[in-house]
């Protein structure tokens, strides 16, 4: 495998091309751990493990509603779990009130053990209003913390990515002394999850597709790194970006292998189970000293439209096998954490994109439905059943729809009460609306105190950075701050998406404010084509923070006309520039590899201007001619030199 392909497809960026319009900024060592309270070490060392049950698990055959059993059975005559006999459901807890009484699928004896040990909370009726029943869209909604409203259907980023980006500014793809590990680690998938995508399009997670113990060897064997001596050109900038990414990947791969080899496992996991293999790796990494905050593991197969059960034996078949693997794997993981002495550090939560229909279909299966269950596992969890069993008389399009808990209220509890996310961190994750309605799933003693909330010291809370093209061809850059502390000024910077950013203006900041402040800068000379804008905030202690970028395309007709002839060229070509004003000009030539061939600065006057370029010193082939006027106008063209 080529190293570039590995970096692009298997590690960062979720399969996105690495040559995007913007080049991320490295801020090596700029930030330290966000938690400063010495009494919060326990909170700071915690990690969340999420298990995505891909396909939409049949919650009604997983957690059977005992008090509504007849309705359940009548709607599922060929696939129901029996309430009598040797294969009857497992009664979860006779002490529960009638509205919460539940039976476990008989394959889930391990979940019964976890429940009896006080380490399992079952949350009923989890979903969101008017849920989407498309696998792809519903998964995206769960991963982005969205819903079916137009504003939150296509957020385009993930709640985990936004949360990690806020709590660990400067640490994305940038290992530091205080955070040497990737902020997120994902297994069981071929591409990075939307859940880890930040608002700026970065991915703070590593996609681990090979054995962790040999990860560094695998990465180091993927070909050579680019030369440390790079051309001063567009191509050189791109190669520098790849080099920086590779440096981060090498550091992460060595770290992952190191902590894996330093860790161990002390229990036996189910054999031939991909889920168990993933969880076993997570336990070993955490024991070895990994500081990764969120682990995402994936298990597929839950889209049981057909052959969910074996005809004549409803407790056997594909779904039973999935549930047994889920329960046995999670129990082994929890046992391992206990034996390793790290049980306090970890909570595991499952989620799936939707439930299944109440009525069975004609293929011994079920179809895409409504609300479902979530399972929260760990020593810190308040054991029991949260929320009454779903009302099987409240059916919309064959599916149970009465929601007991918005899934985001569970996310809010996981992030705030277990990981210690403060109000601003929840807002970054787009979960602040659920701060006061969090699902009650943790023991009081385990809940992070407000004094231990992640207190990243940011000079501002910036909101709603945007660029707007005006009728006169200029661009307004608007932004708002919700609060400011010791801010000095905003530098407004611009790029054409290829070259580095340059300063185009300065806006004075408020200094200190607890009220919303609106800012505006007008770019009177946008590039024709892509314009990217970002803000560099300077505060009173001279520290800087970067926000953005945002992009906009302009198509305003230029007052300057360019022509380059002849093309192909033999010994020279002419550049003709007709303009309505006097200004400075820069002409730069590169070969196809990005090597600088020619660079000159000059002035042009109102009217026609001509430049003759001798190409006899240049090797034959394509040459890129870049012309930039001091007002920001650009022209780029390729010339074939023969």
Image (cartoon, rainbow, N blue to C red):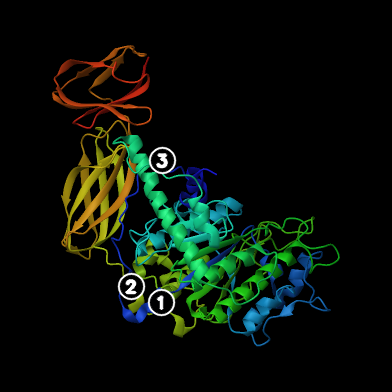
Dot 1 or dot 2: first in sequence order is 2
Q: Residues within 10 Å of mark 2 (few under 14, many from 20)?
A: many
Cβ atoms at labels 1 and 3 below 8 Å apart: no
The circle on residue 605 is none
Reading the image, the residue beneath label 1 is 43
Residue 232 percent location from the top left of the image:
28, 36
Reading the image, the residue beneath label 3 is 19
Name the image quarter holding the N terminus: top right
Dot 3 or dot 2: first in sequence order is 3
- Helix, strand or loop status at disc 1: helix
Q: Is residue 350 above or below residue 202?
A: below
- Helix, strand or loop status at disc 3: loop
Name the image quarter holding the C terminus: top left
Instruction: Indicate left or right for 360 with 396 as reference.
Output: right
**For the point 62% across and 72% down, which residue is it?**
330
Instruction: Indicate left or right for 8 with 602 as reference.
Output: right
Q: CA distance from mark 3 to mark 2?
A: 35 Å
Q: Nearer the viewer, residue 119 or 150?
A: 119
Q: CA distance from mark 1 to mark 3?
A: 38 Å
Residue 460 percent location from the top left of the image:
25, 61
Cβ atoms at labels 1 and 2 below 8 Å apart: yes
Marks 1 and 3: which is nearer the front? 3
Q: Nearer the viewer, residue 455 or 100?
A: 455
Q: CA distance from mark 1 to mark 2?
A: 9 Å
Q: Is residue 616 above or below residue 438?
A: above
Reading the image, the residue beneath label 2 is 35
Instruction: Indicate left or right for 68 with 42 as reference.
Output: right
For residue 233, what is the image quadrant?
Answer: top left
**For the point 20% across and 43% down, which residue is it?**
503
For residue 332, what is the image quadrant?
Answer: bottom right
Residue 378 percent location from the top left of the image:
55, 78
């Amino acid at each position: 495998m080529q190293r570039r392909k590995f970096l692009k497809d298997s590690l960062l960026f979720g399969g996105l091309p690495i040559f995007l319009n913007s080049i991320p900024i490295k801020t090596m060592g700029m930030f330290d751990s966000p938690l400063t309270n010495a009494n919060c070490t326990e909170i700071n060392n915690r990690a969340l493990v999420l298990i995505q049950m891909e396909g939409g698990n049949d919650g009604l055959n997983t957690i059977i509603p005992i008090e509504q059993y007849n309705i359940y059975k009548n709607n599922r005559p060929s696939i129901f779990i029996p309430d009598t006999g040797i294969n009857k459901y497992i009664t979860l807890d006779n002490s529960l009130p009638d509205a919460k009484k539940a039976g476990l699928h008989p394959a889930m004896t391990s979940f019964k053990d976890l429940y009896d040990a006080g380490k399992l909370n079952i949350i009923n009726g989890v979903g969101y209003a008017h849920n989407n029943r498309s696998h792809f869209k519903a998964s995206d909604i769960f991963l982005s913390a969205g819903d079916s409203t137009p504003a939150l259907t296509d957020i385009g980023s993930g709640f985990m990515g936004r949360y990690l980006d806020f709590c660990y500014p400067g640490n994305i793809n940038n290992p530091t002394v205080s955070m040497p590990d990737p902020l997120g680690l994902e297994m069981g998938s071929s591409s990075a999850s939307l859940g880890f995508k930040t608002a700026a399009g970065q991915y703070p997670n590593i996609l681990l597709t090979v054995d962790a113990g040999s990860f560094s060897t695998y990465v180091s064997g993927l070909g050579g790194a680019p030369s440390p001596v790079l051309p001063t050109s567009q191509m050189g900038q791109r190669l520098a970006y790849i080099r920086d990414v590779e440096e981060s990947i090498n550091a992460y791969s060595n770290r992952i292998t190191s902590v894996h080899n330093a860790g161990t496992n002390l229990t036996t996991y189910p054999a031939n189970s991909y889920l168990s293999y993933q969880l076993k790796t997570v336990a070993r990494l955490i024991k070895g000293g990994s500081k990764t905050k969120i682990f995402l593991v994936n298990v597929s197969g839950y889209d049981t439209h057909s052959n969910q059960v074996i005809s004549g034996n409803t407790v056997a078949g594909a779904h039973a096998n999935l549930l047994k693997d889920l329960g046995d794997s999670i129990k082994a993981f929890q046992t391992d954490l206990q034996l390793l002495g790290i049980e306090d550090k970890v909570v595991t939560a499952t989620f799936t994109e939707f439930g299944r229909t109440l009525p069975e279909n004609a293929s011994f299966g079920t179809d895409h439905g409504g609300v479902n269950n979530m399972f929260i596992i760990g020593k810190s969890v308040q054991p029991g059943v949260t929320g009454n069993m779903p009302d099987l008389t409240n059916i919309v399009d064959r599916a149970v729809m009465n929601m007991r808990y918005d899934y985001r209220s569970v996310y809010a509890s996981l992030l705030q009460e277990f990981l210690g996310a403060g109000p601003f961190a929840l807002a970054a994750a787009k979960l602040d609306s659920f701060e006061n309605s969090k699902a009650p799933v943790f023991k009081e003693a385990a809940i992070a105190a407000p004094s231990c909330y992640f207190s990243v010291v940011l000079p501002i809370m910036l909101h709603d950075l945007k660029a707007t093209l005006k009728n006169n061809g200029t661009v307004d850059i608007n932004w708002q701050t919700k609060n400011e502390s010791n801010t000095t000024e905003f530098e407004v910077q611009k790029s054409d998406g290829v070259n580095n950013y340059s300063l185009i203006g300065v806006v004075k900041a408020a200094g200190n404010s607890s009220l919303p402040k609106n800012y505006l800068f007008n770019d009177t000379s946008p590039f024709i084509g892509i314009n990217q804008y970002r803000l560099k905030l300077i505060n009173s202690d001279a520290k800087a923070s970067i926000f953005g970028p945002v992009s906009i395309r302009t198509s305003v007709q230029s007052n300057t006309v360019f022509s380059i002839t002849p093309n192909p060229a033999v010994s020279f070509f002419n550049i003709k520039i007709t303009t309505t004003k006097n200004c400075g000009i820069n002409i730069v030539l590169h070969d196809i590899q990005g090597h600088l061939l020619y660079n000159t600065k000059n002035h042009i006057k109102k009217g026609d201007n001509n430049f003759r370029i001798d190409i006899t010193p240049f090797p034959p082939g394509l040459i890129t001619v870049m012309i930039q006027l001091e007002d920001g106008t650009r022209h780029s063209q390729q010339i074939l030199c023969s």
